[in-house]
Image (cartoon, grey):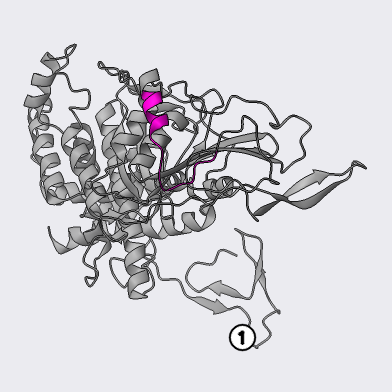
Amino acid sequence: MGVADNNKIQIAVGCYYFYSSSAEEVFGNGLHKVGSRHEDTDGAENSEERERHQTESVDNCCSKLPFTGRWCDIEVLDITPTLPPFCPARPSGSQLVSTANYTVLELFQQFFTNTVLLTVITNTNKHGTTAYNPWVDITINDLFCFLSVVIYMGIVKVPSLTDYWRQGRLYSLSFPKSVIAGKKFLSILHALHLSSPADDTVNERARGTAAFDRLGKIKPLYTEIRSACRNNYHPGQHIAIDERMVTSKARTIFKQYLKSKPVRWGFKLFVLADSTTGYTWDFFVYEGKSMEASRNGLSYDSVISLLNTDLLDTGYKLYVDNFYASPAGLFWDLRQKNISACGTIRTNRQGYPRTTINALDPKSPRGSIRWIRENPLLSVQWKDMRDVFLCSTMHMAHGKQTVQRRVKDDAGHWSMKDVPIPPAIKDYNRQMGGVDLSDALIGYYEAVHKRKKWYKTFFYHFLDIAIVNGYILYKEQCEVKASNPMHQKLSSPSQQDESGMHHRLVYINTSGDKTQGRLRCRKCQAKTPVKCSTFCVF
């Protein structure tokens, strides 16, 4: 790859990092609050034998309290649960060489490796040769130029793709035209292919059988990206699992509908992310109803498949929502693996206390807490604007934490008061937003294109994951080296604008009085003592 091509994609990725940094500051990390959860109907259903086995498996590291058959309030003291020590298999954070000074392009290539690039080039050329005539094989330089413009399109939005190469003054965008010709870009866009056409033919013949792979057209890149995400970073103690929707209008059997998500129609991914940084550590695509149904349910299986116990050893704290939380199933099994869990719960889930003695009622004041502990499993009710139900294997029932809420007194007056909040709910609100933070960083400047081919949708999403994860590695590298992050890097020291004209500001009145002779700007209507010496807009 030549120096010019290296600069092109480094500019594009660098610009993305600059704008993503601004977006993160606006978005923050308080992303996932209890209350706005999903309405999925899939659950973890366990047999009586499994429930009996889990109930008999008493966790020796926690004191066993007898089940009283009633909800306790804050007047009843709770025990402090003994948690397994945090012993990660690798140091938390970046797994790259700490003494090296990686450029943004090198960090991007930790995910889009040479193996990934050569796979895309080979399969695109094979598909282009058979589907398009004439076809000129693309090189790695062509692919880098293509990727740099795709990233640029995520930052600069115009109505259509061809507008990036228009010659008119309205769309005078020099970057795409200086990187790749418009026809070349569109030809790569149309012929883009991730899997071998020969393998696609063999897989298509197996359609309708157990040997058919629904993700066959993305499998080479899908496998490489997942492996790179796990190898380049190790999450901290707090992790979260949630769904992610990738928008698409393609017609395929595993497209999903989630009415509680901002993106309602698209492909559903189950994602494990670091709660603090939003790093996407692992994910998998939901393929629809499996031919071999699991007796544990989708929610249970998705969590277990993402928790790689070879790398995520003891002491991790997992946060999930009410789609996954299952007291009698998932939380018990995770505790046996020395992984603590916390999450909102549906009250009809197996293992949740059925008693209503001393439970919250509609007249309970705001901030009221009720709790029941069964061995390490804590069930909590909290009165906010609505009743919040949560289970945890790592928290006490109540403590000294408070939160400000508007409360009406006996006279009917509203005022801000500190009301108690269970530690489990406060930690849940703080730590559950890992996947949402990752979605936000992707969503602000995602490289999305409306394509009819579903596998191309995944290609752009994998590109977004690589950029955001690389951005997180870059921020960590800057923190370690105590250096300022690169905001935006120009390809040349020239400060010329798109028209090639130099602009120099001069004072309108040279007498020293900066208020005399001021003109009003035609664009913002503000008065200013300076004007442009080359092209005056006043």
* Residue 188: quarter of image: top left
**Which part of the image, by quadrant, shows the C terminus?**
bottom right
How far across and how far down the image is residue 50, in percent?
Answer: 36, 24
Identify the residue at image location x=65%, y=34%: 71
Relative depth, front residue between 243 and 411:
411
Q: Is 62 above or below relative to 5?
A: above
Relative depth, front residue between 330 and 486:
330
* Residue 24: in magenta span: no
Q: Which span is picked out in magenta?
A: 50-65
Residue found at the far top of this picture:
208
For label 1, count other residues whose C-alpha is less than 10 Å away and answer few (under 14), some (14-19) or many (20+): few
How far across and how far down the image is residue 136, in percent?
Answer: 8, 38
Relative depth, front residue between 292 and 99:
292
Pointer 1 residue: 510
Left or right of 83? Residue 68 is: right
Total labels: the figure holds 1
Identify the residue at image location x=38%, y=60%: 499
Q: Is residue 290 visible?
A: yes
How far across and how far down the image is residue 477, in percent?
Answer: 32, 67
Identify the residue at image location x=22%, y=49%: 228
* Residue 412: quarter of image: top right
Left or right of 137? Residue 487 is: right
How far across and how far down the image is residue 76, in percent?
Answer: 67, 45
Q: Is residue 165 visible?
A: no
Q: What residue type is labelled 1?
A: Thr
Q: Is 321 above or below relative to 480?
A: above
* Residue 55: in magenta span: yes
Left or right of 368? Residue 284 is: left
